[in-house]
Structure formats: structure tokens, C-alpha cells
Image (spheres, rainbow, N blue to C red):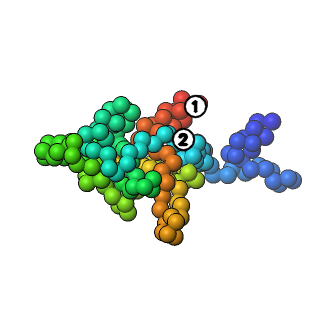
Amino acid sequence: PDLAILAMSGILDARPKVGYFYTGKTAFSFISEKIKRIKVAERKSVPVIVDEQTSVYDAIVTMFLEDVSTIFVVENGYFAGVVSRKDFLKNAIGGLNLHKTPVAVIMTRMPNIVMSTLNESILEAATKIIDHEVDSLPIVEEVMKDNGDRAYKVVGRITKTTIVRVFAELGNNE
Ligand code: ADP
């Protein structure tokens, strides 16, 4: 029965009439497989979105009210860019007229945005966050505009907090 339990957990493999053999999997491989199986779709949080015409001032207020560090910007409903805390600070100390300037002027624009999709694994999303040194990723779905151009709709966000939560859950064996 002990061998059967190890076979069920994937540590041993059983060959009828031959016997049991070690699959080579360690505890780390199980954690790694588990993380790879968690999809972005299961963990996404609600995106905070403003229109490109929104003033920088109003976008900063939105950031506080919604308690987020990154805001996604849309043009005619389609994903256009990202503004983060540092973008706001940089422009505020630079003396920008926060009330008169639309957020589109200071955002990081498409196509320079690192994005995620619903079907991606949480591990792929975490790797993008680390590789590109950003705090969050918009989760997008590709759509076709009326004129046939490709565009994206924002359907969620994934942040460093999302990843830390998964890490804590795995550590606590939840
Ligand atoms: P913070 O400003 O709070 O440190 P980030 O480190 O995420 O936040 O942002 C740093 C810079 O990267 C900002 O200029 C921001 O516009 C940009 N940025 C944020 N998220 C992304 C992303 N997913 N893809 C590309 N650029 C991003």
C-alpha cells in the first residue's frame, strides 16, 4: 500500500509484472507543476480603467480611490496604454498642469506594453513581471475593430500582489 500511495502521488511509476520505479520527480517538480497549472483567468483581478481624455489629476484621484498602483487607459474602449505611480510623480514634480493635461500624454503606450492573456499560466505572467520590471500586467483579449484592424480589450489585471498571494497559499499548503 505504501508503494501504491507513492505511485498515486507521481513519485513512483508502476509497471504491471515488472515493479515500481522512481519517476525522478522531486517535491520541487510538484510545486512547479502546480504553479504552471494555475491560469491567469483564475487569479485575475478587476482592472481600473480610464479614458485617454481623463485629466492626469482625475487619474491620480482614481488611483487613490481604487487603491491601485497602475491604471489602464483606453481610446474608444480599446486598450491604449498604462500609467503608474512613477509616471504621475515624474510629471507632477516636473510642473505639468495636472488638470489640463490628458492622461494619454504621459502614459506608456501600445505597442510597448507587456500584456497577459486569460489562458496564460501564472508562472508565465510572473516571469514577464520580473523580466520587464513592472508591477502589473493588463490581461487582454484580442478583438477586430470595425475597420478590420486588430485591437485589445482589457479584461483584467495581474499584479505582484497576485503572485505573492499564490506564493503564500502554496507555502501554507492551501
Ligand atoms: P511604479 O511606477 O509604481 O514603480 P511600474 O514599475 O509598474 O510602477 O512602472 C514603471 C514604468 O513602466 C512606468 O513608466 C509605467 O508606465 C511602465 N509600465 C507599467 N506597467 C507596464 C507594462 N505592463 N508594460 C509596459 N510598461 C509598463
Expressed as whole percent of the image width and height from the top left, the position of residue 109 reads: 33, 58
Comparing 2 with 79, the one in front is: 79
Secondary structure at numbered mark 2: helix
Residue type, mark 1 in image: Asn
Question: What residue is shown at x 49% (from left), y 39% (from top)?
Answer: 45
Comparing 35 with 4, the one in front is: 35
Question: What residue is shown at x 30% (from left), y 35% (from top)?
Answer: 61
In the displayed structure image, the side of residue 27 where residue 64 appears, left or right? left
Mark on residue 136?
A: none
Q: How many marks?
A: 2
Comparing 77 with 131, the one in front is: 77
Tell me the residue that label 2 is attached to. 43
**Looking at the picture, does residue 156 appear above or below residue 105?**
above
Residue type, mark 2 in image: Arg
Expressed as whole percent of the image width and height from the top left, the position of residue 64 reads: 32, 32
Earlier residue among tags 1 and 2: 2
Mark on residue 173?
A: 1
